[in-house]
Image: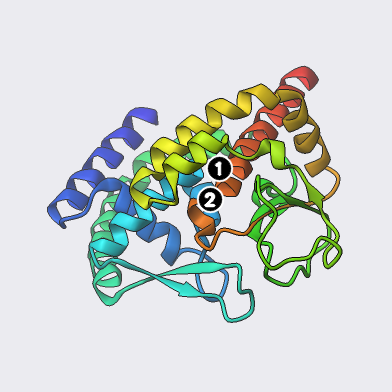
């Protein structure tokens, strides 16, 4: 069955290249088209669907936007959210690829069906809830209308915001070092390298990150930043690190139960 799936995926990737897309762009279009929330998925949704780190999902979306396949739209009901949608060119390319993939899957159905029926007899129960529902990122200037722990993770207090105007935790020591923050200077071209270096710095705070991961199992965490480009913020990188820690913690629990 694995061999059959590998052959199918190889053929699918070949068709994506023939259509002028990378396989990753094809998967991105599928993730957006298949999302069941009105308005389309967020970057976080896409990252979760494709098993990507947040900064990698941002880079993938940036390239798809430049290629005219995807557009970013503001969520009319949530100022913090940016949602993704296919352009006409993106939808057209996906429709052509989907037709070819569907035909190939139909051809393989008789081969896969008996194998799948064997697997279907084995029950699997996954973890309840979504990590991305429990750990999110937002701007500190936007209205806070969700439950949970709201934590400011910038090193500097936001301009124009009085400390007695809002009640939240401030974990400024979890922010990037001053040197790294100044080097990054919110340059989109430096984000991927910034994310890698900041993730290394977070290794100095493993005990506190474990506490936040454990807390996210009980109440949602909302990491807040004053940065306008939330998708490429340190808060987004920190959220990704916590989500990874949550997934690892669940894996350890499952192994210990077995």
Q: Nearer the viewer, residue 82 or 124?
A: 82
Identify the residue position indicated by label 1 in the image. Answer: 237
Residue 38 falls in image quadrant: bottom right
Which mark is nearer the camera, 2 or 1? Answer: 2
Using the image, determine if residue 207 lies above or below residue 23.
Answer: above
Identify the residue position indicated by label 2 in the image. Answer: 233
The C terminus is located in which quarter?
A: top right
Is the residue marked by circle 1 packed among few (<14), some (14-19), or many (20+) residues within 10 Å?
many
The residue depicted at 42 percent of the width and 66 percent of the height is: 33
Marks 2/1: CA–CA distance: 7 Å
Residue 91 falls in image quadrant: bottom left
Q: Nearer the viewer, residue 67 or 200?
A: 200
Horizontal and vertical percent position of residue 113: 44, 43
Residue 128 falls in image quadrant: top right
- Where disc 1 sits, the SS reads helix
Using the image, determine if residue 3 lies above or below residue 159.
Answer: above
Please tell me the numbered disc located at residue 93.
none
Horizontal and vertical percent position of residue 175: 63, 40
Q: Nearer the viewer, residue 130 or 203?
A: 203
Q: Nearer the viewer, residue 224 or 3?
A: 224
The answer to whether one can see residue 126 in this image is no
The residue depicted at 78 percent of the width and 43 percent of the height is: 216
Q: Mark 1 and mark 2 in contact (Cβ < 8 Å)?
A: yes
Is the residue marked by circle 2 packed among few (<14), some (14-19), or many (20+) residues within 10 Å?
many
Going by the image, does 210 lie left or right of 184?
right
């Amino acid at each position: 069955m694995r061999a059959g799936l590998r052959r199918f995926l190889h053929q699918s990737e070949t068709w994506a290249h023939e259509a002028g897309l990378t396989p990753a762009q094809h998967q991105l279009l599928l993730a957006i088209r298949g999302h069941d929330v009105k308005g389309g998925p967020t970057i976080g949704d896409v990252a979760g669907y494709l098993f990507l780190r947040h900064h990698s999902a941002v880079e993938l979306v940036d390239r798809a936007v430049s290629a005219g396949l995807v557009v970013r739209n503001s969520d009319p009901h949530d100022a913090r959210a940016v949602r993704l949608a296919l352009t006409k060119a993106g939808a057209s390319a996906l429709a052509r690829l989907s037709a070819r993939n569907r035909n190939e899957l139909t051809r393989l159905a008789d081969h896969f069906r008996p194998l799948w029926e064997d697997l279907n007899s084995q029950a699997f129960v996954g973890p309840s809830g979504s990590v991305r529902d429990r750990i999110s990122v937002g701007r500190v200037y936007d209205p806070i209308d969700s439950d949970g722990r709201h934590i400011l993770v910038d090193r500097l207090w936001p301009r124009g915001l009085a400390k007695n105007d809002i009640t939240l935790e401030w974990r400024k020591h979890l922010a990037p070092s001053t040197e790294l923050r100044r080097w990054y200077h919110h340059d989109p071209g430096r984000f991927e390298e910034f994310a890698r270096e900041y993730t290394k710095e977070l290794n100095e705070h493993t005990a506190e990150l474990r506490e936040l991961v454990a807390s996210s199992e009980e109440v949602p965490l909302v990491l807040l930043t004053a940065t306008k480009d939330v998708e490429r913020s340190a808060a987004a990188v920190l959220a990704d690190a916590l989500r990874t820690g949550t997934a690892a913690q669940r894996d350890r629990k499952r192994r210990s139960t077995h």
